[in-house]
Image (cartoon, rainbow, N blue to C red):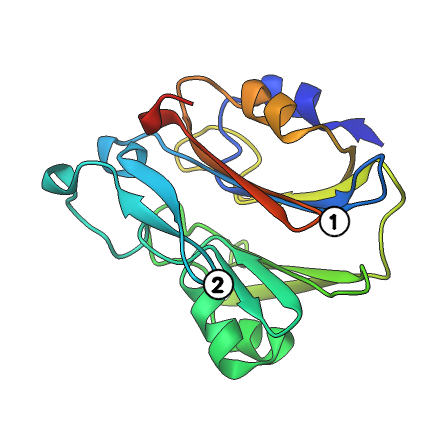
Amino acid sequence: MQDLCELLRNNPYPGRGIVVGKDWGGRHCAYYWIMGRSPNSRNRVFSLTADGIRTEAHDPALLKDASLIIYHPVRRMGDDLVVTNGDQTDTIVDTGDFFAACMAREFEPDDPNFTPRISAILHAGGSFELSILKRQAGASGRCQREFFCYEGADEGTGYLISTYQGDGDPLPSFVGEPVEVSLPTANELWVALNADNKVSLYANVGGTVKLYNKNLGD
């Protein structure tokens, strides 16, 4: 098991990330953060909706292209919680089937990065699934879809999946299985994210939601 805060302190740009697990009090947890390098990506905040959250432009006058940065990262689907890094959240909820929805989507069309789509679904009983859709290395536009299913997590343990391995040009996609990590508090995670690149953090701990927004002074 790796220390999540240490991983984040040593990685200036993991991009968008999802962590699912259980805290030391036995509460199910879901974290989702966004980061940005461009002014357009950094010009965002998380806001609450009736069934989850959405991203919004902090300053609408500065918004240039909303296609890949404005979406619903978190929505409820019955008793399940869906967390993703893009508009595939809506595909999953509208389809009602996590696997089928992910099979119908692919990586983002942001050449040369081809940002992976990462997704998670948390079931009421504590089991969860993670998915990553990324461009297959060396392939001509083919999508590699990976799914990871967990019966649950031990106390104090989470599973991390992110869009990127780190900074670069182009940005290197996440590889391998979700990383087993020690689960910090939301405050500790927010502090560990790179101060220049972090934008927002969603934390759901035992059903209690807290939002962190750098643009709002958090």
In the image, is 144 to the left or to the right of 201? right
Question: Residue 13, which numbered label?
Answer: none
- Between circles 2 and 1, the one closer to the viewer is 2
* Residue at image location 61% in from the left, 80% down from the top: 97
In the image, is 146 to the left or to the right of 138? right
Task: Say which amino acid is labelled 2.
Answer: Asp
Residue 141 visible? The answer is no
Q: Residue furthest left?
A: 61
* Residue at image location 23% in from the left, 52% down from the top: 66
Q: What residue is shown with label 1?
A: 177
Q: Secondary structure at mark 2?
A: loop
Residue 151 lies, with reference to residue 186, above or below; the image says below
In the image, is 124 to the left or to the right of 37? right
CB within 8 Å, label 2 to label 1: no
Going from the N terminus, do you reach mark 2 or mark 1 first?
Answer: 2
Q: Secondary structure at mark 1?
A: loop
Task: Say which amino acid is labelled 1.
Answer: Glu
Report which quarter residue 86 is drawn in: bottom left
Residue 106 lies, with reference to residue 31, above or below; the image says below
Where residue 43 appears, x then y in whole percent?
26, 35
Where residue 187 appears, x then y in whole percent?
60, 24
Q: What residue is shown with label 2?
A: 51
Where residue 125 appears, x then y in whole percent?
81, 64
Within 10 Å of disc 2 (Cα), the crowding (few <14, some 14-19, many 20+) is few
